[in-house]
DNA sequence: ATCCGCTGTGGAGGACCTGGACCGCCAAAT
DNA sequence: ATTTGGCGGTCCAGGTCCTCCACAGCGGAT
């Protein structure tokens, strides 16, 4: 029962364009049954959406970095994510425990763009930054095999 | 020309299940033309695949962490990614510049699982670890608006 | 000028989607 | 024990979409 949903999610994480017919064959259900299960998974928020996975280098973003962020004034209200949400170079923003408050994952084309991005982040959010350059990415975005 | 490809990629990153017919309408091309452009993007490696985006909490992985990794013996051959590639809890592995050699992004269900995962990583790869717990994730996996 | 490769169009058959009608099961209430 | 209702499934049909193929326009090279 719940196992069927996990199976469907697993299949769609691996191939987000699989047809409902094929999902049905793979799970032993009819097309319609799979379809409504997927719809329920979507509106329950288990499946948030579908996306093509793109090679960042191929679209002109060969430089990846992690930026750890710490507010200048720890007593100020903390709205860093809001302040930075318009910056498209930021792929992810995690609030973390530890020395710094947030870890950002960013993608840019050149070191110059990174420099400019850092200054934008510092002034926009009122934070100091610590940047870790990614040299290569052996693997990334692997499916969470449940 | 190249602009068309960027447009198609953008659309598919936002909605990985969009039909070729709709892609055609959005780009002003015929279905067939879009189709073969997408095929070329796929086999050129620009589009690596398609995936459903899943809420990690909804599939029983509410705990995310970054693990920075540094080999005990810096002179030993460095095959950390290979040694760790079988561990499904590791979602991503980045080689980085700086104090540590790699940053891993992991997802587990409970602190106990994280503890166990850390010891597995240490013994399997011969590394010391520094773990940063993610408290919350304001956003993640945003499309790289090119 | 002709050829040739590339890219796009149009069409047709088949696969796929999508909604509705219907059925079986289980549980709770009568 | 029977009824009732909700849930989750199958089956079916119409319309849409995919997918391949033949062909057209268009540069560039011979």
Image (tube, coloured by chain):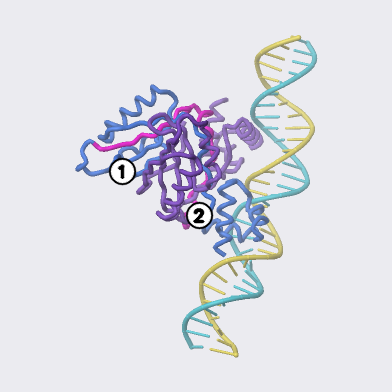
Chain colours: A blue, B purple, C cyan, D yellow
Badge 1 and badge 2 in a common chain? yes
The image's mark for residue B91 is none
Q: Residue at x 52, y 42 (%)?
A: B84
Region in magenta:
A43-71
Residue B96 on image: x %, y %: 43, 31
Q: Quadrant of residue D8?
A: bottom right
Q: Chain of mark 1?
A: A
Is residue A51 part of the magenta span, yes or no? yes
User: Which numbered disc flags the more N-terminal residue, 1 or 2?
Assistant: 2
Is residue B88 part of the magenta span, yes or no? no
Closer to the camera in the image, A131 or B5: A131
Closer to the camera in the image, A45 or B11: A45
One can see residue B41 in this view: yes
Single out the mark in the foreground, 1 or 2. Answer: 1
At mark 1, the secondary structure is loop
Q: Residue at x 42, y 53 (%)?
A: B62
Residue A42 on image: x %, y %: 50, 54
Asked if labels 2 and 1 touch by Cβ distance under 8 angstroms, the answer is no
Q: How many marks?
A: 2
Q: Is residue D1 left or right of residue A127?
A: right
Q: Residue at x 33, y 40 (%)?
A: A102
Closer to the camera in the image, B48 or B93: B93
Badge 1: how crowded within 10 Å, few (<14), some, or many (20+)? few
Instruction: Indicate the quadrant containing the N terminus of chain A: top left, top right, bottom left or bottom right.
Output: bottom right
Q: Residue at x 56, y 30 (%)?
A: B5
Q: Which residue is mark 1?
A: A98
Closer to the camera in the image, B74 or C16: B74
Badge 2: how crowded within 10 Å, few (<14), some, or many (20+)? some
Q: Which residue is mark 2?
A: A42
Q: Quadrant of residue B73?
A: top left
At mark 2, the secondary structure is helix
């Amino acid at each position: 029962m719940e196992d069927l949903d996990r199976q469907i999610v697993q299949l769609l994480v691996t191939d987000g364009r699989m047809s409902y017919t094929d999902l049905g064959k793979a799970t032993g259900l009819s097309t319609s049954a799979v379809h409504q299960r997927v719809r329920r998974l979507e509106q329950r928020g288990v499946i948030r959406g579908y996306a093509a996975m793109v090679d960042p280098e191929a679209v002109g973003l060969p430089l990846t970095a992690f930026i750890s962020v710490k507010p200048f004034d720890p007593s100020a209200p903390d709205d860093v994510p809001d302040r930075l949400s318009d910056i498209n170079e930021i792929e992810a923003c995690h609030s973390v425990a530890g020395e710094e408050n947030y870890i950002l994952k960013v993608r840019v084309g050149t070191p110059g763009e990174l420099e400019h991005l850092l200054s934008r982040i510092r002034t926009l959010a009122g934070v100091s930054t610590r940047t870790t350059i990614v040299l290569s990415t052996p693997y990334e975005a692997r499916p969470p095999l449940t």
